[in-house]
Image (tube, grey):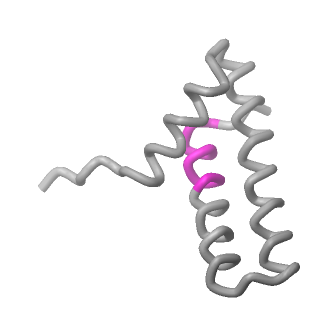
Amino acid sequence: MAHTFEDLVNLERLAEEAHAAYIASPDGDTRAAWRQAADTFQAAVVEHAEAEGASRYEVEMAAKKAVRHPEPEAV
């Protein structure tokens, strides 16, 4: 089953959180958790891009932008 764009955003968010945990406490366990989260995100990006006939790079960058630079919420 292909991942939705929302799934990708959630997986990237988890990878970013795991990276922050590794930066805060750099050890083998937090590094492994970060790498696993990043690998899971990358695999989902490839799957989504193939299913949508889209560029893997563009899909990845759109998900990362949504996490790192979210649009302001309407008031």
> From this viewpoint, which residue is outermost toward the bottom?
25
Placement of 1 over or under 37, stated as above or below: above
Q: Position of residue 51 (x, y in %)?
A: 72, 20
Which quadrant is home to the C terminus?
Answer: bottom left
Nearer to me, 52 or 41: 41
Which residues are drawn in magenta? 4-12
Q: Main secondary structure of the magenta part?
A: helix
Asked which quadrant contains residue 21, the reply is bottom right
| Residue at 62% in and 46% down | 7
Nearer to me, 65 or 73: 65
Which quadrant is home to the N terminus?
Answer: top right
Placement of 27 over or under 43, stated as above or below: below
How many marks do you count on the picture?
A: 0
Placement of 28 over or under 72, stated as above or below: below
Asked if residue 41 lies in the magenta stretch, the reply is no
Q: Position of residue 64 (x, y in %)?
A: 52, 45
| Residue at 74% in and 42% down | 42
| Residue at 65% in and 53% down | 11
Placement of 3 over or under 57, stated as above or below: below
Q: Position of residue 68 (x, y in %)?
A: 44, 54
- From the viewer's perspective, is 69 left or right of 21? left
